[in-house]
Amino acid sequence: VVHRARLRDGREVAVKVTRPGIRRKVAADLEIMRRILPRLASRVVGGDAALVEPIVEGLREQLAEELDLRNEASTMRHFRALIGSSNLPEIVVPEVIDVGERVLVMEYLDGVPIDDLRAVADYGFDPKPLVQQVVKAWFLTTVRDGVFHGDVHAGNLMFLPDGRVGVLDWGILGRLSAETHDHFRSIIAAALGDEAAWDRVTEFFVQQAGPLVEARLGIPAEEIPAFARSLIEPLLTLPFGEVQLSSLFIGPEAASGGGEGLGFVRQQMSRTGPISDDLVEFDRGMFLLAKQLLYFERYGKMYLSDVSLVSDRDFFASLIA
């Protein structure tokens, strides 16, 4: 829980405190999930009991990090320094004032959620350039380093009365595997016109979804690279108002106007045919990446409907470099 408080010197602060006994409760819940969820998954159409253990372990890892508030403080200090040196003056990460394992004291920011259009209008400034800076700040470390704020819902992005944006709640940090990070960088490079990067992107697509595309859509193997590019390129180069970033993750059948989303997620492919068990895995970094892109798709449609994801080509080119 987070409380508003005042220091003895009069400064207002926000104080985050973990609830008493929360570690024991979380441990008990995770153990219950570990035992029950495989049984439930085996009884649900489309369920996959083999995925339950890695998903629960991923959740266990995430919660263990969140329950020690020193981790969040370390992340805040790192990103505050990084953004402060990256020519993004309107982005604010709260200053850490003091921290222990169960208590985090930080700078208090007062504002309104990024999706509260009426309250934002009352502030009287143009939110569009601020949202563009938010997008840049998030991609700054995602593209360059493979780490990112893992929970950018509207409650954690706050317009401040002075025309800045506060980025709150750094308890969840996304980390991409080396393979996923390389693939994500290749996608951005491809959107900037790098043909060699397009070769890498379509090769990855073929590896992940080629058998599915061929089986479900009847597209010959030699035509799948061109098909992949026709799906992915518009998502990155057309204005936010004309695209669905979620199509990067809901899969080729849905993206081309077909039925339910099939996903590039590996476990989905295991249901389409005799694909080896080592493809059945849960990539926490990819999951968090997909989730954040869905948030940015929403904010883009709200404020940047006429702007593409990589509209500032120099900025993204510098990240790739």
Image: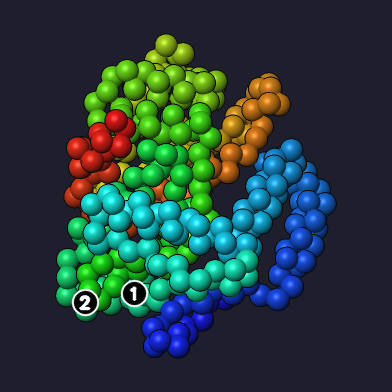
Q: Image check: 181 left or right of 115?
A: right
- Taking depth in this image into account, of 39 and 65 the one nearest to the observer is 65
- Taking depth in this image into account, of 195 and 15 the one nearest to the observer is 15
Q: Secondary structure beneath disc 2?
A: helix
Looking at the image, do the residues carrying marks 2 and 1 touch, with CB atoms under 8 Å apart? yes
Furthest residue in direction front, as rendered: 9
Q: Closer to the N terminus: mark 2 or mark 1?
A: 1
| Marks 2 and 1, how far apart at CA | 10 Å
- Taking depth in this image into account, of 194 and 63 the one nearest to the observer is 63
Q: Is residue 73 visible in the rendered structure shown here? A: yes
- Taking depth in this image into account, of 122 and 243 the one nearest to the observer is 122
Q: Secondary structure beneath disc 1?
A: strand
Residue 209 drawn at (x, y percent)? 51, 26
Q: Which amino acid does label 1 sit on?
A: Val
Q: Identify the residue at image location x=68%, y=26%.
A: 278
**Hey, which quadrant is residue 25 in on the image?**
bottom right
User: Callout 2: few (<14), some (14-19), or many (20+) C-alpha neighbours within 10 Å?
Assistant: some
Residue 94 drawn at (x, y percent)? 39, 67
Q: What residue type is labelled 2?
A: Tyr
Q: Mark 1 points at which residue?
A: 112
Q: Image check: 91 left or right of 174?
A: left
Quadrant where the N terminus is found in the figure: bottom right
Q: Is residue 237 visible in the rendered structure shown here? A: no
Q: Is residue 196 above or below residue 53?
A: above
Q: Identify the residue at image location x=38%, y=32%.
A: 185
**Hey, which quadrant is residue 247 in on the image?**
top left
Residue 275 drawn at (x, y percent)? 66, 22
User: Callout 1: few (<14), some (14-19), or many (20+) C-alpha neighbours within 10 Å?
Assistant: many
Q: Name the residue under label 2.
A: 123
Q: Identify the residue at image location x=52%, y=21%.
A: 207
Quadrant where the C terminus is found in the figure: top left
Residue 111 drawn at (x, y percent)? 33, 76
